[in-house]
């Protein structure tokens, strides 16, 4: 993947309420970081004391500074060393790198490089929603984890009976549009989607719209007569090679019954996550043993677009077809 490009984006790394007084270690694009509250400010520094390369996330906060647990060096919010025990003065300043932080929607966001303005993709400007946000992680390939969410062709098998039933094929008209930093796939349903979740919660969905925006934001809207009745958003975060974070935001139009719907829906969504997690982790383990190219067909709806955006491959082909799942 193009690491230099990916470092210029904002990523959701931690729930705001999860960061207490103790520093927390996080990873982003293979880089160890420490998030810490210094006074009223959330600070992100590289997770390394330059004295002996000990993790600052093992340290503690003292008088508004972050103190290393090994030799007691202290750092301010800019990553500047403010005190070295037993050292009267420094010939020149010692610093570690600090990173931009933004707090929005109860989430701590971090940008590693550049001056890109912050934009919260979870914002729903078109509908008034009630939402629930969950943080997940799995050991899997970053690109294929996104593909798994956006490409429905696996659902009759991995989510057999839960989302779709292979023997009751569902026809849909598929169209795609490429954007500057993403793409949109629209599914116009000819037949009602089957499966247990749809039997219980689907009151007549006729259109699905799945979109992707760099560097890892995916959204699926379920519409009934052009009205959004369910929206699921996931920001996929590349912690390290082989470890992916998922910030999952489930949105429902506001009503007095919404809290009950969330309670009823959650066990089914957790089951779907477990099923996906199992196959994606197994895939990642196995693919490291083989040095062979993948075989793709026109039924693979999103992989060429993802490889284009992440790996600077040629532009993908926008699909227009009638599919049966």
Image (tube, rainbow, N blue to C red):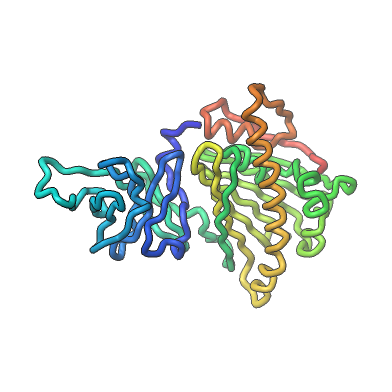
Question: How far from the left and from the top, in percent, is residue 146?
Answer: 61, 42
Residue under the image location 25 percent in, 42 percent down: 51
Residue under the image location 83 percent in, 53 percent down: 161
Residue under the image location 62 percent in, 42 percent down: 145
Residue furthest top in the image? 292
Q: Nearer the viewer, residue 144 or 200?
A: 144
Residue furthest right in the image? 167
Residue under the image location 47 percent in, 52 percent down: 12
Left or right relative to 203: residue 317: left
Location of residue 308 (image quadrant): top right
Left or right relative to 191: residue 29: left
Q: Nearer the viewer, residue 306 or 185?
A: 306
Location of residue 126 (image quadrant): bottom right
Q: Nearer the viewer, residue 145 or 164?
A: 145
Question: How far from the left and from the top, in percent, is residue 105?
Answer: 47, 62
Left or right relative to 31: residue 240: right
Question: How far from the left and from the top, in percent, is residue 282?
Answer: 68, 39
231 up-or-down from 313: above or below: below
Question: How far from the left and from the top, in percent, is residue 45?
Answer: 33, 48
């Amino acid at each position: 993947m193009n690491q230099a490009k990916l470092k210029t984006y904002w990523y959701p790394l931690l729930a705001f309420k999860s960061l207490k007084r103790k520093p927390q270690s996080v990873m982003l694009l293979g880089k160890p970081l420490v998030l810490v509250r210094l006074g009223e400010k959330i600070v992100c520094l590289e997770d390394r004391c330059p004295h002996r390369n000990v993790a600052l996330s093992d340290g503690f906060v003292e008088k508004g500074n972050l103190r290393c647990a090994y030799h007691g060096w202290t750092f301010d919010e800019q990553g500047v060393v403010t005190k070295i025990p037993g050292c009267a003065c420094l010939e020149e300043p010692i610093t570690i790198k600090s990173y931009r932080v933004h707090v929005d929607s109860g989430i701590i966001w971090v940008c590693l490089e550049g001056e890109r303005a912050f934009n919260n993709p979870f914002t729903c400007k078109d509908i008034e929603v009630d939402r629930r946000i969950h943080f997940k992680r799995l050991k899997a390939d970053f690109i294929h984890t996104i593909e798994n969410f956006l490409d429905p062709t696996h659902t009759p098998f991995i989510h057999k009976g839960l989302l779709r039933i292979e023997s009751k094929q569902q026809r849909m008209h598929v169209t795609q549009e490429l954007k500057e930093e993403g793409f949109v796939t629209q599914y116009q349903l000819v037949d009602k989607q089957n499966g247990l979740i749809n039997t219980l919660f689907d009151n007549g969905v006729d259109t699905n719209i799945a979109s992707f925006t760099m560097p890892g934001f995916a959204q699926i809207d379920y519409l009934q007569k052009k009205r959004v009745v369910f929206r699921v958003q996931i920001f996929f975060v590349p912690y390290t090679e082989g470890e992916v974070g998922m910030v999952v935001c489930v949105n429902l139009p506001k009503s007095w019954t919404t809290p009950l719907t969330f309670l009823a829906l959650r066990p089914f969504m957790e089951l779907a996550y477990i099923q996906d997690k199992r196959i994606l982790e197994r895939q990642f383990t196995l693919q490291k043993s083989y040095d062979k190219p993948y075989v793709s067909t026109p039924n693979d709806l999103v992989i060429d677009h993802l490889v284009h955006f992440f790996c600077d491959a040629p532009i993908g082909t926008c699909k227009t077809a009638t599919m049966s799942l």
